[in-house]
Image (cartoon, helix red, strand yellow):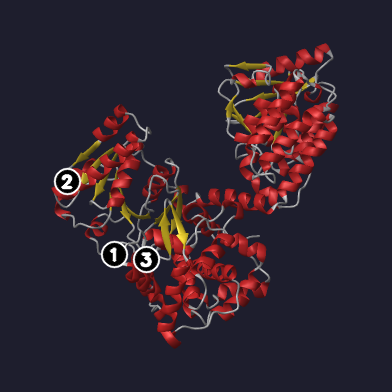
Amino acid sequence: MSGQVQYELQDGVAVLSLNRPGANALVQSTRQDLAEALERAFEDDSAKGVVVCGAGGCFSAGADVAELDRPAIGPLIRDICALIEDAPKPVVTAVHGVAMGAGFELVLAAHGRVAQKGTKVSLPDIALDLVPCGGATQRLPRLIGAQASLEFMLSGRPVDVSDAKFVRVFDAIIDDHPLRAARILVKTLAAGGRWEKSSDQRRGFSDPQVFAKSVAAISGRVKKTNSAENDMVKCIEASQLLPFDQGIAFERARYEDRLNSAESRAIRHLYTAERRADNMPELASGKASEVATVALVGSAPILAELAVLCLNAGQKVLVLAADDAGTEKLMSRVREVYDRMSEAGELDQSDQDERLARLQSIPNESALGQADLVLERGEMPLDQNNLNVKPNVCWVMINLPGVVPPKNFPSRAALQGHIVVLRVQRGVSRAELMELAVPQETSADVVATVRKYFSDQGKVVLRSVEIPGMMGENLTAALMRAAIALTAAGASPFLVDDAARKLGFKSGPFIMMQHEGFARVQARLETLLKARNLRPFEYHALLTDRHNANTGQDVNTHGFYELEGQKLRAHKRELVWLATWRMKQGSVLPKLPDVPLVTALHAAIVNEAARLIDRRALLRPTDIDVAMVRGYGFSRSRGGPLLQADINGLLPLVRAMKQLSELDETLWSCHPLLTRKVQNGERFFN
């Protein structure tokens, strides 16, 4: 035994305490210890019954997701549940804190259950595109019926044990720690010589017609046949239609099918990657401070979006612009946002008034001393002689498009150790991704504070380094440059966009560029290339020429699509313009290689990712996939471009680059990191 389950005989009861650092996760070693402790208790003549509880702050946070992608080593959670249910002595669980996933499945397998008030239980398998694997789909419906079971499992969200739908799950819900009450219950069961298995329960089947109607109604709302949601419904249905053992076998088969599916693998990859992304080196020693007051320096539109984000989070927001007109412009933008929210019924007048009351202008730099967090766009000089800030202030430079704030900004020199650089996307309230670059001298406390502040507002904060464009812009620039090069050489822009969607993006690169504006994209791409001492080829003028061709015309857009109603539509006349443009370029344009467009786009992104990894512009390769999924519309069900490269193989991409490099050597010349991986038979992820 590894000592992760403590065995203690208390007043004739064997008390087994899960005691593993990390919320008593049910990893293989813990499961092994628990199985051995249960067997010991069953053979211990001094023990009349068994109580399973959790040491520390909770019962169990469930299984370790990382184990799902490794060969299974027993005992599995279903084996432990079967061991508990078929025990020769009564087994009661004493639950406090949380019982998640496999932890809650242990609870359901017991003969009695006692919980402390406020305890949360959940079966979050659906978030990983899985169904439970320890018998929960067969045991829970027997206790509370189909409707409550399906709503609980399909949501994946934690539920308080006092919820009315869970009254029949627990024998007692008490104010104190449940161990003492669990010992009393298990001795009562042992004295009576009889205890009921969950598999023998029938309370949830009391009205078979209602059960069947609930299953049918929820099944009708599940749109995708091949999905964890549909499998969950089928498992619950099987609990009523099949004998228990057959239902368990049915659940196991559905679980294994989902476990081996490409979609589930991708979602698990992202789940793990996002948790790794939160592990920044500064967080080991840095202590996050509370943010009560935020100051905005400048009047750029992005600051107005950030003001709304901060006001919605409950902070006081101070505005310092270059002049009164700039201040009023920013504050007016904020009021307009809240007016639109009020008109849409998203906010009532009292809430709007309360938030706007926390938005105030300040006269000069000295007033910045009130702020815990300062967001500066880098658009106005600050009087360093008048600058007075708190000792632990967090000063955030908002990243400019394609560049980073230069190191000679006055505020950088005066605030050394307090500054981080944050790259945010337009549409801040809806955007999920923020990239955080940390100068070498910045304190760990500042990093911890900024990360916590934005994470608490639902943002994924990725640790990057201070390079032009950081991670996300360089990756999407590779996609856009590839799209331009392929289209200039003869590909249809509409087929290029279709290829991007097949790769996994929600929108194609030309639609992305059209939404942003071709002229703006062209300028940003040139800025990024210049930062790397690279000169764009002539065909990069495609964007500028297309924009200029539309300027002054009666059109709704400046790209290859036209706006019809609320949607962008492709038109053949745009292809006629493109053919004419190509003829004018003459021999400047290279020939389109015989490479599938999906492969060409994928190769460009993976090659750029290899450059960023080699440059150590990110903490880990999984951050690339997180950035693409959370920030740029790559499908979560496909896991990210690097995972797809692992699944499909790096060799086809490297071979394609040999042809594509003739089209644009700066984009497709294979990075040595990829060559080494192919030669050594390596992947990005194990």
Q: Regarding mark 3 in the picture, which secondary structure is present there?
A: helix
- Of circles 1 and 3, the one toward us is 3
Instruction: Give the residue at mark 3.
Output: 518
In the image, what residue occupies the spot 80% across and 25% down?
Answer: 199
In the image, what residue occupies the spot 66% across and 49% down?
Answer: 264
Instruction: Give the residue at mark 1.
Output: 406
In the image, what residue occupies the spot 23% across and 40% down?
Answer: 370
Indicate whether 277 appears above or below 580.
above
Label located before the other in sequence (1 or 3) = 1
Indicate whether 358 appears above or below 73.
above
Q: Position of residue 668 (x, y in %)?
A: 52, 76
Side of 579 relative to 56 (left or right): left
- Of circles 1 and 2, the one toward us is 1
Task: Tell me the CA gap for discs 1 and 2.
Answer: 23 Å
In the image, what residue occupies the spot 78% across and 20% down?
Answer: 202
Task: Tell me the CA gap for discs 1 and 3.
Answer: 26 Å
Residue 310 vs residue 36, the one in the foreground? 310
- Dividing the picture into quadrants, the one containing residue 539 is bottom left
Which class describes the residues within 10 Å of circle 3: few (<14), some (14-19), or many (20+)?
A: many
Q: Position of residue 293 (x, y in %)?
A: 28, 39
- Dividing the picture into quadrants, the one containing residue 122 is top right
Task: Tell me the CA gap for discs 2 and 3.
Answer: 41 Å
Instruction: Give the residue at mark 2.
Output: 366
Image quadrant occupied by the C terminus:
bottom right
